[in-house]
């Protein structure tokens, strides 16, 4: 069983670590945008595995900040 | 935790709004067994995507499937071929500030012998990064002359481990 985090908690983290972020739902994924960059295959479900969050945070260069908001990341 | 740098090739055909496109990429990713016990594939080129599985090959298979759905999403959002091509190229080249460095560090660990590949990595073909340079090609197929199509253009999916240059 993979550790997972609710999207609500991820939204809270992004508000702190990626001010100005936005997202929309595509047919297959959640598309998250920040600082001119796009993360294209974030899962659409409510509980997200840590690896997906880690990947997105590395992509946006906010991993260190995110680790402070999401324990275990 | 060992980070394995891998190189892969995917070839796809995608229908969009008024066009048919052929996309071929020579990509880079990092595969790692994370603390959750799962194998994760983290895209470097293309960045902005990841997937996991109970085994290396399951994670790779899901990563491959996800990549294709990203192309489908881009096709759905693009109003024409030019917009599709530009967005696929952005998707391919855009990468986090430290991701290429992570891949290079993992490559150096392989080159130095600090990492001895375990199965199934030990069974992967070995190529130098120069033999499989990063790249993406997005072609419009619906306006190409049928005489330009050939079975010789078909490219199978490949997954390889880098050798020293």
Image (cartoon, rainbow, N blue to C red):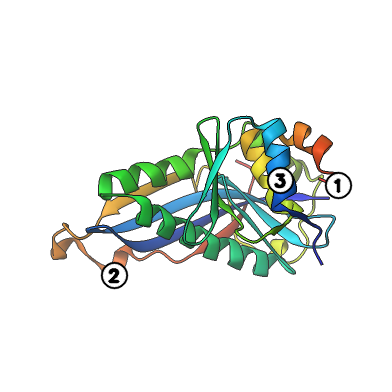
Q: Earlier in the sequence, mark 1 or mark 3?
A: 3
Q: Is B16 on the left or on the right of A40, as rendered?
A: left
Instruction: Write down the residue under mark 1.
Output: A72
Q: At 83% from the left edge and 35% from the top edge, which residue is drawn?
A: A68
In the rendered image, residue A20, in percent from the top left (x then y), is placed at 58, 31
Say which of A47 and A8 sits in front. Answer: A8
Q: Is B132 on the left or on the right of A3, as rendered?
A: left
Q: Are marks 1 and 2 on the same chain?
A: no
Q: Is B113 on the left or on the right of B20, as rendered?
A: right
**Residue mark closest to the camera, 1 vs 2:** 1
Q: Secondary structure at mark 1?
A: loop
Rendered image quadrant of residue B125: bottom right
Q: Is residue B128 visible?
A: no
Tag 1 near tag 2, CB within 8 Å:
no
Instruction: Write down the residue under mark 3.
Output: A10
Q: At 51% from the left edge and 61% from the top edge, which residue is drawn?
A: A28
**Residue mark closest to the camera, 2 vs 3:** 3
Q: Are marks 2 and 3 on the same chain?
A: no
Q: At 36% from the left edge and 55% from the top edge, which residue is drawn?
A: B75
Q: Is residue B145 above or below residue B27?
A: below
Q: Given the image, what chain letter belongs to the residue carrying mark 2?
A: B
In the rendered image, residue B152, in percent from the top left (x then y), is placed at 30, 66
Q: Given the image, what chain letter belongs to the residue carrying mark 3?
A: A
Q: Given the image, what chain letter belongs to the residue carrying mark 1?
A: A
Say which of B151 and A56 sits in front. Answer: A56
In the rendered image, residue A15, in percent from the top left (x then y), is placed at 68, 35
Instruction: Write down the residue under mark 2.
Output: B151
The answer for how far apart the CA atoms under marks 1 and 2 are is: 49 Å
In the rendered image, residue A29, in percent from the top left (x then y), is placed at 54, 57
Rendered image quadrant of residue B89: top left
The answer for how far apart the CA atoms under marks 2 and 3 are is: 46 Å
The answer for how far apart the CA atoms under marks 1 and 3 are is: 13 Å
């Amino acid at each position: 069983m993979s550790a997972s985090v609710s999207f609500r908690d991820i939204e809270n983290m992004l508000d702190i670590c990626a001010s100005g972020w936005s997202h929309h739902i595509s047919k297959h994924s959640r598309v998250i945008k920040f600082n001119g960059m796009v993360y294209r295959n974030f899962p659409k479900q409510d509980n997200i595995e840590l690896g997906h969050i880690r990947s997105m945070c590395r992509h946006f260069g906010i991993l260190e900040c995110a680790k402070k908001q999401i324990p275990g990341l | 935790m060992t980070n394995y740098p891998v190189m892969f090739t995917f070839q796809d055909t995608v229908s969009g709004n008024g066009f048919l496109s052929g996309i071929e990429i020579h990509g880079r990713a990092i595969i790692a067994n994370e603390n959750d016990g799962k194998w994760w594939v983290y895209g470097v080129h293309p960045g902005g995507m990841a997937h996991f599985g109970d085994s290396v090959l399951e994670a790779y298979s899901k990563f491959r499937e996800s990549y294709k759905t990203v192309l489908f999403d881009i096709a759905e959002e693009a109003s024409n071929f030019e917009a599709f091509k530009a967005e696929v190229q952005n998707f391919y080249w855009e990468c986090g500030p430290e991701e290429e460095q992570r891949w290079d560090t993992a490559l150096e660990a392989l080159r130095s012998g600090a990492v001895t590949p375990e199965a199934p990595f030990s069974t992967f073909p070995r190529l130098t990064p120069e033999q499989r340079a990063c790249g993406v090609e997005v072609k419009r197929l619906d306006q190409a002359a049928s005489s330009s199509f050939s079975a010789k253009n078909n490219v199978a999916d490949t997954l390889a481990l880098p050798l020293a240059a």
